Amino acid sequence: MMKLTSFWCLRMALVMVTLILVLGASNLFAQGRTSEAREYGLKNPYPREQSPEQHSSGSMTAFTRSTDTRVERALQQAESARSASPPRYQEAADAFRFAAFYDPKEVRAYFGLGYVYFVQGRYAEAAEAYKKAIAAQPSLPEGHYDLGVTYVHLNEKQKALSEARILERLKSKFAVRLSELATR
């Protein structure tokens, strides 16, 4: 009886250690910290779909639809968490990062992530998120405005004025507001 009990205790200990490693790695993967998660020696529990090149032409539509659905669900979850009372900003940030991971050109994911970081006072991270939104869609005035306001909070007024000049070239009504904020 003693051998059987010690066997089960050892087995439970191994299961617990494995569970801790898997949960830790999956949390890091979900946060987009893949290099740290790989140190656990585990595979990504949220793998991207196969690349389009790996699909036959007939299944390309299924690949796109699957990814689109996953991204839309993540964006809906993020918006729900962000607009909750009280807001669940960490949950929103995780969902926005997930959406950006699956669709790096998804502007809404970067805008949402930038907003969440901004309201938390994490201005440097907000600026990075807004830069990614602008990279995905350079002609979107809101991205330049939000980045400029973030630069004002970082006390980088010259960069904010640079964003205001871009807004002027885009003929945006936000240009004057951002210029006023940057020159205060």
Image: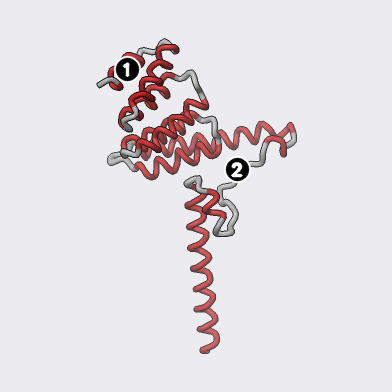
Left or right of 59? Residue 89 is left
Q: Is residue 35 above or below residue 106?
A: below
Q: Position of residue 143 (x, y in %)?
A: 42, 24
Which residue: 28% across, 41% down? 86
User: Circle 2 is placed at which residue position?
Assistant: 48
Q: Nearer the viewer, mark 2 or mark 1?
A: 1
Q: Decide which of 173, 102 is in the foreground and name it.
A: 173
Q: Position of residue 111 (x, y in %)?
A: 42, 30
The Cα–Cα distance between marks 2 and 1, rounded to whole angstroms, is 41 Å
Which residue: 46% across, 29% down? 131
Q: In this view, which residue lies farthest toward the front?
A: 158
Q: Position of residue 46 (x, y in %)?
A: 56, 48
Q: Decide which of 168, 157 is in the foreground and name it.
A: 157
Tag 1 or tag 2, which sits nearer the N-term? 2
Left or right of 93? Residue 13 is right
User: Circle 1 is placed at which residue position?
Assistant: 179
Which residue: 51% across, 30% down? 106
Q: Decide which of 159, 94 is in the foreground and name it.
A: 159
Q: Is residue 90 above or below residue 107?
A: below
Asked if disc 2 and disc 1 are in contact, CB closer than 8 Å, the reply is no
